[in-house]
Image (spheres, grey):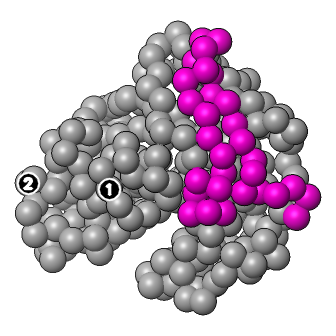
């Protein structure tokens, strides 16, 4: 376990990396005794300092919920991060590439809650009952920690690499479609790079939201009504460069487009 001064130092380092659009060396290599609870403590302090700076938490993201993402990162358990108001972008956004240290895109579904969700016994059915609507979303991953050799403590400390999200397509009630069979085609510059089906997220994307509610209960918090929850990617992350146009088609749920300049 880390000392409080170590947690504060790491949080400050990550805040500076976000401000400077830079990447820092692996936390796990420089802090060999670091544990998962240490990394969540770093994330919580980092988030609190952003709140103190005037930003507002509007939701949570879940990461590493699919076999595709676990294979891409070499990390075998889910994690979570927080979503701030300045991270949510509209469909068709032109996004400054220099706002990020690096850019990868994931295809996801976002759940918007109508009721609170509280662990530790939250189930998939509780999630469906509490959901106002589900809507397509692209997550923009942004790592402030070098990618090669990352462990779970690196990703959690770095707010699960949450950079931003683009919301679009057609919102649907949770029972209006079979969410397991929602599929997507992910294009970069008119070329399909990835495809996936939402059942790749723990067999049902709502399962990830239930996992999150139960995990947050361990940290003394809950999911509140009105929160937006990114349920986890069902494609591998796709690298993006300056000038790229990203387009995702979700069939009957519509499409999302954004461009990086």
Q: Is residue 130 visible?
A: no
Q: Position of residue 240 (x, y in %)?
A: 47, 22
Q: Residue at x 60, y 89 (%)?
A: 121
- The circle drawn on residue 75 is 1
- The circle drawn on residue 226 is none
Nearest to the observer: residue 219 or residue 248: 248
Q: Secondary structure at mark 2?
A: helix
Q: Secondary structure at mark 1?
A: loop
Q: Position of residue 61 (x, y in %)?
A: 55, 57
Badge nearest the viewer, 2 or 1: 1
Residue 227: image quadrant is: bottom right
Taking 154 as reference, is 111 left or right? right
Q: Quote the CA–CA distance across marks 2 and 1.
A: 19 Å
Q: Residue at x 50, y 58 (%)?
A: 65
Q: Choose the circle earlier in sequence order: 2 or 1.
A: 2
Report if residue 139 lies within the magenta region.
no
Q: Which residues are magenta?
A: 175-204
- The circle drawn on residue 30 is 2
Nearest to the observer: residue 185 or residue 19: 185
Q: Residue at x 27, y 32 (%)?
A: 22
């Amino acid at each position: 376990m880390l000392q409080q001064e170590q947690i504060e130092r790491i949080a400050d380092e990550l805040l500076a990396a976000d401000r400077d659009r830079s990447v820092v060396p692996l936390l796990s290599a420089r802090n060999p005794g670091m544990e998962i609870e240490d990394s969540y403590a770093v994330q919580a302090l980092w988030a609190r300092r952003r709140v103190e700076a005037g930003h507002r938490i509007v939701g949570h993201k879940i990461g590493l919920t699919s076999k595709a993402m676990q294979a891409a990162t070499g990390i075998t358990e889910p994690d979570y991060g927080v979503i701030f108001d300045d991270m949510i972008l509209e469909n068709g956004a032109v996004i400054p590439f220099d706002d990020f240290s690096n850019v990868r895109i994931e295809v996801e579904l976002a759940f918007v809650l109508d009721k609170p969700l509280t662990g530790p016994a939250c189930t998939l059915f509780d999630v469906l009952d509490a959901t106002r609507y589900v809507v397509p979303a692209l997550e923009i991953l942004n790592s402030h920690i070098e990618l090669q050799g990352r462990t779970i403590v690196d990703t959690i400390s770095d707010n699960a690499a949450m950079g931003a999200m683009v919301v679009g397509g057609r919102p649907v009630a949770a029972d209006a479609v079979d969410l397991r069979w929602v599929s997507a085609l992910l294009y970069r510059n008119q070329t399909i790079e990835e495809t996936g089906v939402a059942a790749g997220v723990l067999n049902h994307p709502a399962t990830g939201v239930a996992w999150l509610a139960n995990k947050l209960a361990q940290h003394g918090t809950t999911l509140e009504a009105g929160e937006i929850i990114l349920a986890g990617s069902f494609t591998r992350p796709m690298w993006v460069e300056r000038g790229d146009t990203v387009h995702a088609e979700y069939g009957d749920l519509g499409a999302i487009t954004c461009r990086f300049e």
